[in-house]
Image (spheres, rainbow, N blue to C red):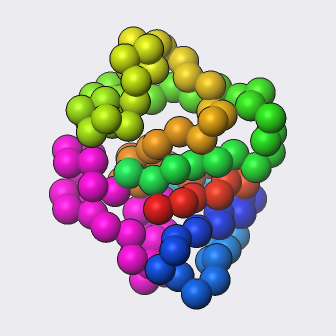
């Protein structure tokens, strides 16, 4: 089970949703289902409009790592959301919080904070 918390200056309060184990929903699908004002243009990872900051809540001191898919990595780099060092790396530390594409980020069994 995962708890996903969405934060945005345009929201009156944070929005928290519990996801059942094994869910493969993307952050974008969850945001749409909750009618959150998360911008998106293509919904396929080609534009970078849905970039969000993802903060893992299970290890807030940066003990985790992330592997980005090539499409997500390319789009985030082109949008200036990843440095050259991050782009050139196979594995990235998840702290400080990474930019991720909401349309590509599939929710796993982990508690995260999503800022957009």
Q: Nearer the viewer, residue 17 or 97?
A: 97
Task: Indicate the position of residue 92 as horizontal and vertical percent values.
Answer: 56, 22
Q: Which quadrant would residue 40 be assigned to in this image?
A: bottom left
Q: Which quadrant would residue 12 be assigned to in this image?
A: bottom right
Q: Please state the extent of the stretch shown in magenta in the rendering.
A: 26-50
Would you say residue 54 is visible in this rendering?
yes
Please, which residue is most extreme toward the bottom here?
A: 12
Image quadrant holding the N terminus, namely: bottom right
**Residue shown at the point (58%, 69%) measured from the top left:** 7
Task: Indicate the position of residue 111 as horizontal and vertical percent values.
Answer: 72, 54
**Residue shown at the point (71%, 63%) measured from the top left:** 3
Residue 81's place in the image compared with 17, above or below, is: above
Position of residue 41 in the picture relative to residue 85 (left or right): left
Task: Indicate the position of residue 5 as horizontal and vertical percent values.
Answer: 65, 66
Position of residue 95 in the picture relative to residue 30 (left or right): right
**Residue shown at the point (53%, 39%) measured from the top left:** 98
Position of residue 106 in the picture relative to residue 75 (left or right): right
Residue 65's place in the image compared with 6, above or below, is: above
Task: Indicate the position of residue 59 as horizontal and vertical percent values.
Answer: 80, 39
């Amino acid at each position: 089970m995962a708890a996903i918390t969405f934060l945005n200056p345009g929201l009156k309060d944070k929005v928290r949703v519990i996801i059942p184990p094994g869910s493969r929903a993307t952050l974008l699908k969850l945001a749409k289902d909750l009618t959150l004002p998360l911008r998106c243009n293509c919904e396929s990872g080609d534009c970078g409009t849905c970039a969000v900051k993802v903060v893992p809540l299970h290890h807030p001191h940066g003990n985790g790592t992330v592997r980005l898919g090539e499409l997500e990595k390319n789009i985030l780099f082109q949008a200036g959301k990843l440095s050259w060092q991050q782009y050139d790396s196979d594995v990235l530390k998840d702290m400080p919080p990474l930019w991720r594409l909401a349309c590509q980020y599939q929710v796993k069994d982990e508690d995260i904070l999503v800022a957009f």
